[in-house]
Amino acid sequence: MIPSFMLRIELTTPRESLTNQDVVAKMQSAIRSILDDAATIAQNFAPGDRLKSQISVEDYRQTASGAEGAVGGPHQLIRFTLPPGTVAHFIPGGLAVHSYGDAAAIQLAKGYPLRFYWERVGAVVYRWSVFHPGYKGSDWGERVFKTVEAIADRQLNDIADYIATRWGSEAVA
């Protein structure tokens, strides 16, 4: 399985309760709030400024019975920051190349240098080849899910309490 980070939330009311538009509106509001919180939390936990700045709410939409949406970001950046991460390798060429010279020969054959943003330098740089030391990945995605799960539980409990109160009962925890 390729590691990735996508938080998708969908909440709908039962078909027979579509006349309860106040409940639907509360659910739509809750989903939007959870997604906004999830994006902020993911930005706080994600490694690297470039990745943090590209995580956002995607595909939020209201439906007749609730809402749905997702939080995500650039797949390649996310994939390589989660476990297992990446192993040390030369670029270009990857694991098949064992020296700067071999990697540079691949790029020289293309006729132009590599161009990439080097976060440590804080600028775009040009190189014929580079050695990437690898990155073991971190559990930041797991921490996001656990934190957002607690927020979503609170929001959904509030909706359940509202429904129970509206119907003249009390929600059972």
Image: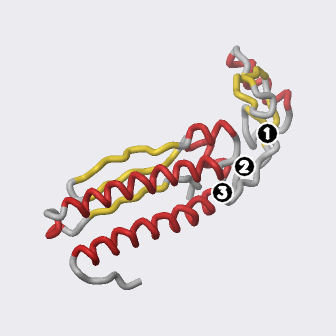
Q: Residue at x 13, y 63 (%)?
A: 19
Mark positioned earlier in the residue sequence (3 or 1): 1
Instruction: Please name the amino acid that badge 1 sits on.
Output: His
Mark positioned earlier in the residue sequence (2 or 3): 2
Name the residue carrying label 3: 140
Name the residue carrying label 2: 86
Q: Is residue 160 left or right of residue 133?
A: left
Would you say the residues marked 1 and 2 are in contact, meaning their CB atoms lie under 8 Å apart? yes
Instruction: Please name the amino acid that badge 3 sits on.
Output: Trp
Q: Which mark is residue 96?
A: none
Mark 3 or mark 1, which is nearer to you? 3
The image quarter containing residue 21 is bottom left
* Residue closest to the eye, 121 or 14: 14
Name the residue carrying label 1: 132
Mark positioned earlier in the residue sequence (1 or 2): 2
Tell me where residue 141 appears, x and y as whole percent: 61, 57
* Residue closest to the eye, 106 or 125: 125
Q: Is residue 42 left or right of residue 56?
A: right
Would you say the residues marked 3 and 1 are in contact, meaning their CB atoms lie under 8 Å apart? no
The image quarter containing residue 164 is bottom left
Instruction: Please name the amino acid that badge 2 sits on.
Output: Thr
Q: Residues within 10 Å of mark 2 (few under 14, many from 20)?
A: some
